[in-house]
Each structure stands twice: as C-alpha cells, then as structure tokens.
Image (cartoon, rainbow, N blue to C red):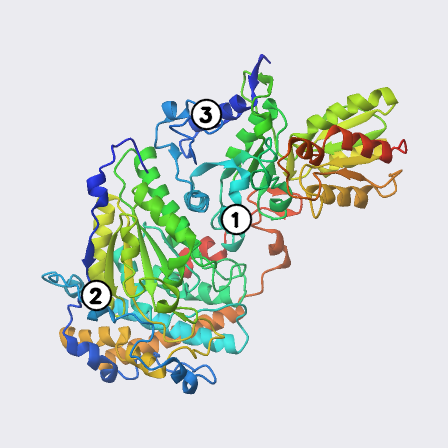
Amino acid sequence: MQGQRPRDEGQRAKWTITDLRTSLLPSRFMSSTASAHSDSRSGGGAAPEAAGNPAAASANGAAADPSGRPAARATERTEAAPAASLAAELPDDVLLGWLRDMLLIREFEVRTMQAYQEKKIGGFCHVYIGQEAVAVGCTAAIERRDPMVTAYRDHGHALARGMDPRHCMAEMFGRIGGCAKGKGGSMHMFDKANNLFGGHGIVGAQTPLGAGLAFATKYEDEVIEGRRSDRVTLCFLGDGALNQGAFHEAKNLAGLLDLPVIFVVENNGYSMGTSISRGTTMGHDISVKAAGYGIEAAVIDGMDVMTVYDAMKPLVDRCRATSRPAFVDMRTYRYKGHSMSDPRKYRTRAEEEQYEASDPIGRLAAWLESSRGFSKQRYDELAREVRQQVRDCVKWAEASPEPPIEELYTDVYVERFGPYLGTSPPQMLRDGADEA
Amino acid sequence: MATREIEFRDALREAMSEEMRRDVRVFLLGEEVAEYNGAYKVSKGMLDEFGPRRVIDTPISESGFAGMAIGAAMMGLRPIVEFMSWSFSLVAADPILNNAPKMLYMSGGQFGCPIVFRGNDGAGGQLGSTHSWCVESLYSNVPGLKMAIPSDPHDAKGLLKTAIRDDDPVFFLESERMLGMKGPVPEEEYLIPFGQSIVRRRGADVTLISFGRPVHFCMEAAEALAPEGIDCEVIDGRTIRPLDIEAFVRSVRRTNRCVVVDQSWPFASVGSEVVAQVHERCFDDLDNHVHRVHSDDVPTPYASNLEQAYLPNVRKICEAVRSATYRA
C-alpha cells in the first residue's frame, strides 16, 4: 500500500540475502536418521513406485543433483548462525505435533496415491511426499489469523493448516463432504475457518492473489481499523512458477506497495519434468530474483522442519513488524513424480535416494530421540495412530454421498437468480466444531 | 426527483465516490487513477477526497493488479479495478476469467469475489485493432460473472452503484466515445437493478435489442426509418449477464420481428446468443428470422472510413430492419 510517504530510495535499494540455511542440528542426525528410523518414511506401508520408473533414469546423467542446484547446505555464502535454535526451545507437545503432522501428510498422500490408482480419485493429483517439513514448519511460524495461499500441490498445506483430513480426502473423492463439496478437487483445497485461500491450479496464478491477501489484511488493519498492520500472508509457489509473468508482477506490487507477504518458493528442483537448470536462469541461486524487486531473500533447507521454523519465524516476525515482503528459496524435494502420471524418467534413482536419506520425518524423530528421550515405541504408536486416522478418513470419504445434482447450480453466484441457486457453505464449515 | 445534466464520466465518479463514502471496504485501483486524475478523468478529484490508501495508482501490470484485487476481494474487501481500456484486460485473462468468476464455485461457497472491473470497451476512434476490443462476447461466455453495459449517464451511475454493492464479480463496460455525453441524472440516490432492460422507444413493427453505445445508433436508425413507415421499438438491455430475455420476448411477441444490434464480432457473440434465445422462445411469433447487426468480422481497421463502415452503424441497422420487415 503506497501511502503518501516519500520514497526512501536508499532503503529500497538495500536488499540482503539472509542466509538462514544452516541447520542447527548436529549433522549426524541428518545422515543417520533414515537408518535410525528406516520404517518411518511411509508411516507404514511403503509408497508404491510408479510402474517402469527407475531403470531408465540414467539417461539423464548421474550428477548428484542433475537439477544443477547445489544442495541447500552446500552453498558458499554463510553467516553466523543464530545463537540457539528457536525450535529446540519449544516444548515436547509442539514438536511431537509437527512430527505427527508430517506423518499424517505422508500417510495421507500414500493413501491418496493408492486411491488414485484404484480410480477413486480423478483428474490431476499431485502429492506432497518429501516436502512435508515445508508446510508444517512454515505453518508453525505463522498464526492462525494469517492468510495462506498455495498452488495445486496443496494437500499438505491444507492438513498442516488444520483441515480435517476427512474433508480433504472427500474433496478428492468428489463427495459432498469435501471441503468444496466435491467441486474443486485435488488442486483446489479451500478452508475459510483456517484462512487457507486455496489451492490454485494455474501455475503462478496464486501469487497476485497472495499479494492481494496481504493488501487486504493491511487495508483492514490500517485503513479500516486504524491500527498497525500485523498480519502476514504466506504465499507458496513451486520453482516452476518463477518464470510466470504473474509472479514477477506480484513481486513488483508487493515491493512497491509494502505488502506483508512472504513468497515461499518450494524449490524441489523440477517444474514437472524440466529441471530448474533447464528452465530458469540463475537456477542455482534463485534468491537473486527477489533482488530486482527490492525484496529480502532467504535460502532455507526445507528438508528439516526445525530449520524451516528457525528460519521462517524471524522472517515472519520481521514481515509482521515492517510490512515488507520477503522471498524464500526453500530447498526441498518431491520424492514422487510431478503428478500421478509421471514416471520420473528425467532424474536418477540415486538422486532420489540422496534426498530420501535426509528425510524430514526421520530427522525430527532422530532429534527427538537424542534430545527429548523420544522412544522408538512412542514413534510406532504415533505412526499407528496416524495410519488408523487416515484409514478412517478414507472410509469417511467413501461413505460421503456424491454431491446432489442441485449442486451443479449452487455457488455460481452468491445471488439467487435464473437457474442459479445461490450459495451455501460446505459441511466442513457448518459443523466444523463437532467434526473436529 | 430533481435532476441535473452531467457527463457520463461524472456519473461514474459519483457512483464510485458515493459508494466509497458509504463503505470503507470499497477502494479504487488502476493505472493513472490517482495522481493523474484518471486517464479519462473519470476518477478526477477522488485522490484528494479519499487519499492514496483508497485511490491507488498501479504500475502497468494488469495481470498483477487484477489478481491482487481478486485476492483482496476474497478477504472481503470490495475493489473497483479500472482498466484504462478493456483491450488491456486481455493480459489479465487468467485472473479475471479463471479466478474471479470461479472462486465461489471452486471453494464450494467459501470464498466469493465482490469485485468490479470497469473501463472503456469498444472502438474509441481510430485506435486500431489492438485497442478497440469489444469484450462482451468473449467474456460473457463465462458463468460466475455479471456484465453491465450502460448507454447513458443515468444508467452509468445507477448500474455502477449496483455493481459495487453486488457480492459477485461484475464486468462493467463503458465507452470512451460516451464519456463526454451529457444526460439527466437525479440528485437523489438511486440504484438500477441488474437484469432489467429498458424500452428507449415504443414501436409496433419491429423490436431492436441492443447494449451500450449502439443503443444510440438504434435510436438514430429508428428516427430514420419512421418516415418510411417502419415503427421501431428500441430496447436497451443494460446488462448482458443477467440477460432480460423475458422483456425481449414480450416485445417480440407484439412486434413479431426482431433485430439484435451488438458491437462485438458476430461469431459466437452476445448477438448470436440473444438471437438463439429469442428463436427458442418466439419461434411461432416471428414473421421473419431474427436479424443481427455487428461489427464486421475483421480486425478493427484504423482508417476513418473503414472504421465507420466496420461499426454497427445506422446504415447497417436500417438495412437489417428493412430486411426483417420485408421492406428491403
């Protein structure tokens, strides 16, 4: 929002790359976690590989990361790490909550793939396996009143934000119990009660919307309420959206109008089958793409939820205090394909295994084990509980009826006229209280 | 009701200013709307009254600021987005067509989009093809949006106030060629509901249906045809979505002949839609097939004579009416 303040060009020209990548965790956990909890990755029930995948992968060359980007923790720029980890100070129940959320997303997505293969889910479907630490760590760094908006790989964000997984699954099943009454599908998860503004299917389309959400919170706080702006919008996008014009326009507007929005680029190295080095200039260091818009950038290891929180929390606090946008190069990896139809022939199995070895669930579990006396037994109990919850949620979704045919003509317009039947909120909002 | 003569642009400004006084959630953004006082002076003086937080200059970045306004509308604000020309809205097609009109549906009723997009539509005056878009046919194809297209200052004000209060996205089509047009506008507040056309001229022989600027061409044609003994009824549709088809049908059942005049291209157009609906409802009432007049099915030319020939002008309307009434 531009106000009448004189432009401080000096300040505007100053942008900094804040390196917040450095994990504060002892490095041994990063390499040892996968073996310490080798059964943890799928939360039980190994995820089915897409047929015909691994063998052909070598065609792409076998660099450790053929996307061309250095691993997040291997870049040259370093700054002194903060004195202590914020996440490490949090109580057990919070950290266990993160572990549970990541397990829930993992298990939910495994069941999603299964249901897709059983043709219970149609259309395009993009699972979040591997990226769980991003949604969970980022959501932990904001407050519930802070808006959030994302792209089409959105199940993880919905669950991290607090959507009941039953409504998320039912949405994909095309049932009336879905968050959008079965009218949105996998790519369009909306949750008004939890300030999740979608789930958007067109690459980059959510980025001007994210700027608009930030515009609106600031307008409400400052113009309507007459107090200081103090809400932050998180706008997620993939690295594929870096090259959409809409995102450049959104960055320009956010920088120009001082919008409190953080663009979190979930940089998993691939836009569909095109590695970032093949599709994006400066793909090895995308944080420079914020510089041209006077936006502060950070690079974060998105494979570790405590690191994500440690890095995001100060960014969010600063954004809240200064109303200045930020840009995050969140280095992450999707273990599965772009969508359910992707055999991942453009990358090697070795590359996938490299990332799987630093699995975010395993890393947190290992840290909890060493620092909080978390036992394997507790972990197994948690995994079992989550598995049961997701099983129940699949059953619930299957039992939810198909939307009645009248739903074809509801929610087209708020107003009722002609053939249009007005609007009504989904079950999730109507009885959200007793659902939870 | 006391009235005064004001320009079309003044009527638009009054509508916006009154609604912004009434509701702090309403704000205006667009290119040159604030410090420049509006590329066409529609928003003249509004920056002074409402300040830069509510009258916001944007960069030339239609996709960005239209999308940003849609995000703000999802949060419950009520943005008015000015496109200097609807021709420029094409670069914002994704937000205005894929987001605004579908948000309510895709979210299962959770997030509406109370937003107004407004600006100049149609040929200005030798602006060439890229700047002369009539977007009504292209955009009205999309369910979830409403579309208003006033033809005089009175309607411009009353329809725009309704648009701003509407909970659904409204595409509001003005015309550069009409901004300076003067007309009587009541001093008192009034709103014009959507979906209610108005009869501009009573007549018995043929029903002319039109929207926006070509309504005036129809009125001229009606005057020209009167000496020939053809008595035209002229209906101004006012809104395209919703479409006041019931009123059109009532008139056609009385006159038994119909000519639709639509300034967009003929193929898959507002004109062809109205023709189809009239035929569906009035098949047994019609003495002739419904005729239609459009811009020619070519890119808008620059040369003055070609542009005049291209538009749905009085000559073309008269020819269509004579043909429809078997006087050709």
Q: Which mark is residue B17?
A: 3
Amino acid, disc 1: Ala
The N terminus of chain A - image quarter: top left
**Left or right of residue B265: residue A434:** left
- Asked if the residue under mark 2 is in contact with the one under mark 3, i.e. CB atoms within 8 Å, the reply is no
Q: Residue at x 32, y 77 (%)?
A: A383
Could you tell which of marks 3 and 1 lies nearer the N-terminus? Answer: 3
Q: Which residue is mark 2?
A: A307
In the figure, residue B46 lies in which quadrant?
top left
Q: Nearer the viewer, residue A374 or A66?
A: A66
Residue A432 vertical position relative to residue B235 in the rendered view, above or below = below
Callouts 1 and 2 in the same chain: no
Q: Tell me: B99 left or right of B177.
A: left
Q: CA distance from mark 1 to mark 2?
A: 39 Å
Q: Residue furthest bottom?
A: A55
Instruction: Please report the residue visible at 21 percent of the width from the left and 80 percent of the height from the top.
Output: A31
Q: Residues within 10 Å of mark 2 (few under 14, many from 20)?
A: many
Q: Is residue A283 visible?
A: yes
Residue under the image location 51 percent in, 78 percent down: A117
Q: Which residue is mark 1?
A: B93
**Type of the residue with mark 2:** Thr
Q: In terms of secondary structure, where does tag 3 sit?
A: helix
Task: Using the rendered image, report if marks 3 and 2 lie on a common chain.
Answer: no
